[in-house]
Image (spheres, helix red, strand yellow):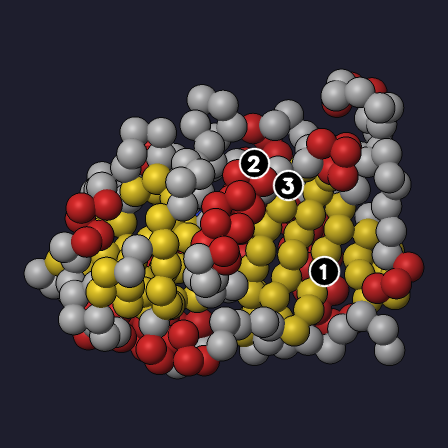
């Protein structure tokens, strides 16, 4: 059976899952989304993802036509319909079809879309040997222009940085904020370890407050690792002992070089390994 996609309460074969070309989600990137994972049939931190989705929607004055409870039920229904237990799940809410102008008041019927598909992790070698990243010259959106805390369908800022990374042979790229401080990567949050202490940029660095990021901060506490939010510059990364990235898709992935410079010894760090193992145990419920 073809993959079944949820749109507004109904399921469609992947090939037939379509929305209007007048949808402002397509015309203007006007909408919000979430990327989540299920492990053994349970969606990891679903409540947090739903809270972030509804907050993103609220921030752009988009009313999601179904409640969080209905969205939760629809998410599990989509997994079940596709017989998926370990999956990547994309929730999308668009502004809906409108006229050929920006005015969101001239749109109707936000579209609620749920896609559940098999997981596509980065290749295993990256988890074992670590990633090489570069700093993109594209800075993260200025929070006063478009807050990075909104997970909107407008991802061009991140895509521009991703292109720079890919052109340099890297699958992830670091983005600085308008003050030149470390913000995050194109689709992942960033952590460093210095003298055994774990640090990550604060929310006001202009980042998406990652759910995996928060899970790692919780895990660090449980493991007795000192961890806090810290404003940092590229200097802090260059002199760090360890570095890793977090995200629902990437999970926890070590970084071993930044702009061609080795991080610490250039090998995957011990604190990173501890957290990576603890994260695996957490999501697999062991
Ligand atoms: N930053 C950005 C820009 C992202 O797109 C993502 C992935 N959604 C993250 C960070 C990581 O967030 P999460 O852990 O909630 O997936």
- In this view of the protein, can residue 274 be seen by the observer? no
> 177 or 165, which lies in front?
165
Q: What crowding class fits label 3: few (fewer than 14 Cα within 10 Å), some (14-19), or many (20 or more)?
A: some
Please tell me which of labels 1 and 2 falls first in the chain. Answer: 2
Say how many tags the image has.
3
* Residue 11 at least partly seen: yes
Crowd tier of the residue under label 2, counting other residues whose Cα lies within 10 Å: few below 14, some 14–19, many 20 or above: many
Q: Residue at x 73, y 77 (%)?
A: 83
* Disc assigned to residue 56: 2
* 147 and 235: which is toward the camera: 235
Classify 102 as above or below 111. Answer: above
Query: Does the residue at mark 3 contact the one at mark 1 (Cβ under 8 Å)?
Result: no
As drawn, 131 above or below 113: below
Q: CA distance from mark 3 to mark 1?
A: 15 Å
Depth check: 286 or 148 in front? 148
Instruction: Kindly report which numbered mark, 2 or 3, lies closer to the viewer in this rendering.
Output: 3
**Vertical order, 147 against 54 (above or below):** above
Residue count near mark 1 (Cα–Cα under 10 Å), binned few <14, some 14–19, many ≥20: many
Percent across and percent down for residue 51 are: 53, 44
Q: In the image, which disc is placed on residue 153?
A: 3
For marks 2 and 3 on the same chain, the one whose residue lies earlier in the sequence:
2
> Considering the image in quadrants, where does the C terminus appear?
bottom left
Mark 2 lies on a secondary structure that is helix
Locate residue 219 relative to residue 79 in the image: left or right: left
Identify the mark nearer the N-term, 3 or 1.
1
Q: Residue furthest front?
A: 167
Instruction: Identify the residue under disc 1.
Output: 115
**Res 178 label:** none
């Amino acid at each position: 059976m073809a993959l079944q996609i949820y749109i507004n309460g109904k399921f469609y074969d992947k090939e037939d899952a379509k929305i209007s070309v007048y949808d402002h989600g397509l015309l203007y990137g006007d909408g919000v989304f979430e990327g989540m994972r299920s492990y053994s049939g349970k969606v990891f931190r679903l409540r947090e993802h739903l809270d972030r989705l509804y907050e993103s929607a609220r921030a752009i004055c988009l009313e999601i036509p179904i409640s969080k409870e209905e969205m939760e039920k629809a998410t599990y229904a989509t997994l079940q319909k596709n017989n998926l237990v370990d999956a990547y799940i994309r929730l999308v809410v668009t502004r809906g079809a409108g006229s050929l102008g920006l005015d969101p008041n001239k749109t109707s019927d936000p579209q609620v879309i749920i896609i559940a598909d098999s997981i596509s992790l980065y290749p295993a070698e990256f988890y074992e040997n670590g990633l090489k990243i570069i700093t993109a010259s594209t800075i993260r959106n200025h929070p006063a222009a478009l807050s990075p805390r909104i997970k909107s369908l407008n991802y061009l800022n991140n895509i521009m940085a991703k292109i720079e990374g890919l052109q340099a042979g890297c699958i992830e790229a670091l983005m600085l904020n308008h003050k030149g401080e470390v913000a995050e990567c194109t689709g992942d949050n960033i952590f460093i370890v210095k003298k055994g202490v774990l640090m990550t940029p604060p929310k006001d660095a202009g980042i998406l407050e990652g759910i995996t990021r928060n899970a790692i901060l919780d895990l660090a506490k449980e493991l007795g690792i000192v961890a806090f939010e810290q404003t940092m510059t590229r200097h802090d990364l260059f002199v760090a002992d360890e570095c890793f990235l977090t995200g629902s898709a990437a999970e926890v992935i070590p970084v071993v070089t930044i702009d061609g410079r080795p991080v610490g010894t250039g090998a995957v760090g011990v604190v990173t390994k501890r957290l990576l193992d603890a994260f695996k145990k957490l999501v697999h419920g062991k």
